[in-house]
Amino acid sequence: MTTTAEPTTTSEIGKARVRKEDQRLITGRSRYTDSITPSGTLHIAVVRSTLARATISSIDKSEAEKAPGVHGVFTAADLGAEEIGLPCAWPVTPDQKAPQRPVLAVGRVNFSGEGVAVVVARSAAAARDAAELVEVDYEPLDPVLDMEAASKEGAELVHPDLGTNVSATWVFDSGEAGSGGSVADAIKAAEADDDQIVVRRRFRQQRLIPGFMEPRSCVVDPTGEQLTIWAATQVPHILRTMTTVTLGVPESKLRVIAPDVGGGFGGKIGVLPEEMLCVLLAQKLNRPVKWTETRSECMLTAHHGRDQIQDLTISAKKDGTITGLDVHLLADMGSYLGLVGPGVPILGAFMFNAIYKIPAYKFTCSNVFTNKTLTDAYRGAGRPEATFGIERMMDELAVELGRDPMELREQNWIAHDEFPFTTVATLTYDSGNYEQATQRAMELIDYAGLRREQEERRRSGDPVQLGIGISTFTEMCGLAPSRVLGSLDYGAGGWEAASIRMLATGKVEVTTGASAHGQGHETAFSQIVADKLGVPFEDVEILHGDTQVSPKGLDTYGSRSLVVGGIAIVNAADKVIEKAKKIAAHLLEASEDDLEFANGQFSVKGTDKGKAIQEIAFATFMAHDYPEGMEPSLDSDAVFDPENFSFPHGTHLCAMEVDAETGRVNLRKYVCVDDIGNVINPLIVEGQVHGGLAQGIAQALYEEANYDDQGTLVNATFVDYTIPSAADLPSFTTETVATPATTNALGVKGVGEAGTIASTPAIVNGVLDAIRHLGVTEIEMPTTSQRVWKALQEARGHKAQETPSDTHSPGAGLGSIDPNNPQGEVQ
């Protein structure tokens, strides 16, 4: 639920409008890629490797080629595609090792599920049936599955020609960058000083699978002068450019359309081998070609997310003041580099310092190849991993110091009167108020009352123990200023484009390069335009997801749609108003300086003379009377390149109950107060936060992609891969506060990833807070009941072996008790 009251306003911005696109989405009148089947379409199915690592001895296509309805069976050699490699747009270092990622395997396979051949048939069912008849003879090789072992000298190589499994190592050092001191010096000084402390921890970010509602799909129609691609993608503009880069098709001959897209979460930003296969086959056969994956195929071969080992060291004075933070990451890239995969952990480099004033900081990340599905962006992309690391470390430091974890955070965070603030990672946070969000969140969850209940449960030996989870976070949104991306060697800019067309009847068409996949763009952007131009909300039409309709754009990811795409729309609207003002002045026989524009009306100051912008639009269309030398058009374009990231923040708190006898974990209550700047539509914000929370909580409690020792994904269906339903989660209590962004005209900051970024550490901190006094110091995610129970048994076994003099508390903390106290031990 939300307790944020809708503001009383006559403006559209701030209204909790029901999304206009929901009418077609909810009633099934939408059009997804799999709904599109041009006349004469052929369907494809990909023959996929059952082994994670092997050489291909032979491929026998003969039985498949004779199957009913089959049009052909093709290998990479048959398509002339042996030298075609899929793009990686982010070389994070000049010496980054990047193996060619083929559209179909050539000579060897490098992960279970890699495409080996493709069957083309008259129906999808016929193609799938025939694919099972293709006989592939493999020579199995031992797979490389452990990223830590793979990163060591002398390890078996995923790609022998590279000479290493380490794709790249990227380092940021505040001492060298001049943004802070030397972290090595800070840690060395802390180790030598009895008045300081050093805490070292290792955390595991498990591998996740983006569970979008709509599986990936692609249709390519070569009919006519242009090649038309329909794709379930977040990035139609990038897909068009990368198709040209990969296959050499002139960009002017490509039209890419993303129709309604059923979720993405970063999982649909890639350039897929199947998309390139559809293009190659459509060109070769001169027929429309279509591919839609099955759910298991999706989970096996769509890129995965997260998968890091984090070794963190934090130094601090005994009074709680942090003096240094050292971060060492290993990031599993899988078998190949995705479109932006190498840069995902690097984004986290700028967020490990979070909201805290850390004077010395170093970040080192090595990207490692293994024989698994490749990893790439997943909701939050590097920011959730960083937030998890630092928020877990803040709790660990609090335990070691015997401090309340919230008080320790407050001692170290940036105060509201210190903004703008340049961090040790060189970013300048323009606005924020961590005190305000935290105070409200603590009130909503009754933090003091929960601490009292926690203490009482420990005293009474209640088998169900209570923990309080905390996450006070910030993130970098609005990816991104092009010059910053350029400094990080990213292969594109961060601008966004928009255009506004004033139609003769006063209606408004808006084209945007931000391509929606469920976020509510059509509603929120309509509200912005309605306010800016003073036209009815219902009279605004938002057009997107088609490179012919909206030819310029950089698409949707990284919470950039509103803070970049929305500002491009605002700027285009300003240009429309300036053009209309000239014509209004002419028609009203007044000076432009004497005109005012408000609520869609141009009026002459001090008079009752005026004209609505719709009247100006019709007069412009008629073109009977307009200023000499001026084109009869109000239509305007704008491209916006942000000057900085935006920095949403918030405080997320949860009450976790853990049954110390069974290990059962229950999320009793979840409260979050987010500062996302000014809110365009509270209803959309609430939905975005709820969805984000579900994904972040799922990582903490439920989700993990599991491979066996042969590199086979063993949970490639929703029967085995656990995604929580509404029945598994409580009603959330959400609120927003606002310190407007100072770097854009709307004062907005972005909300799409906030819930996911903040919630995972809050949940894990809460679980550990519930049972830490029983000797449990760490539980690897997901913190399932089985893992919690096992951790409790191990802690009890460890205690049983200790002598009374050996026994010690792992850290007092607020409300903790001595494990020797029989009332604190659950028997």
Image (spheres, grey):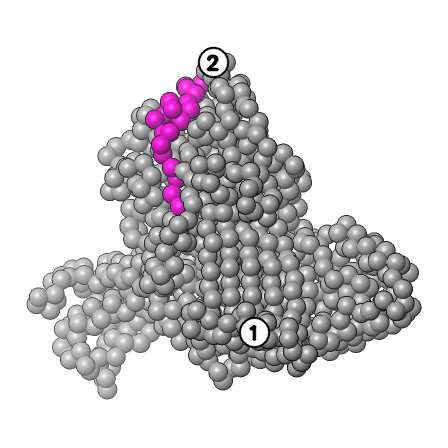
Q: Nearer the viewer, residue 289 or 635?
A: 289
Classify 366 as above or below 76: below
Mark carried by residue 676: none
> Where is residue 505 drawn, in percent x and y?
26, 59
Q: Magenta stretch: residue 71 in it?
A: yes
- Marks 2 and 1, the one that precedes in the sequence: 2
Identify the image quadrant of residue 690.
bottom right
Quadrant in which the N terminus is drawn: bottom right
- Is 539 positioned to the left or the right of 266 in the image? left
Q: Is residue 638 left or right of residue 426?
A: left
Q: Is residue 554 toward the left or the right of residue 108 in the image?
A: left
Q: Position of residue 370 (x, y in %)?
A: 54, 41
Q: Nearer the viewer, mark 2 or mark 1?
A: 1
Residue 495 percent across, percent down from the top left: 33, 60
Please tell me which residue is depicted at 27% across the width and 76% down the height of the picture: 597
Q: Which mark is residue 62?
A: 2
SS at mark 2 in the image: helix
Q: Can residue 243 be found in the magenta stretch?
A: no
Residue bounds of the magenta highlight: 69-88
Q: Give the Cα distance between marks 2 and 1.
A: 67 Å
Q: What is the total number of numbered labels drawn onto the structure image?
A: 2
Task: Say which residue appears at 23% left-offset and 60% top-offset.
Answer: 635
The amino acid pointed to by label 1 is: Ala
- Residue pictured at 41% horizontal, 49% vertical: 96
Return the mark for residue 186. Answer: 1
Q: Residue 219, how many percent across, how many down?
A: 39, 35
User: Quick one: SS at disc 1?
Assistant: helix
Q: Nearer the viewer, residue 640 or 395?
A: 395
Secondary structure mostly seen in the magenta stretch = loop
Q: Residue furthest left?
A: 628
> Residue 190 is drawn in which quadrant?
bottom right
What amino acid is found at the position of numbered circle 2 in the picture? Ser
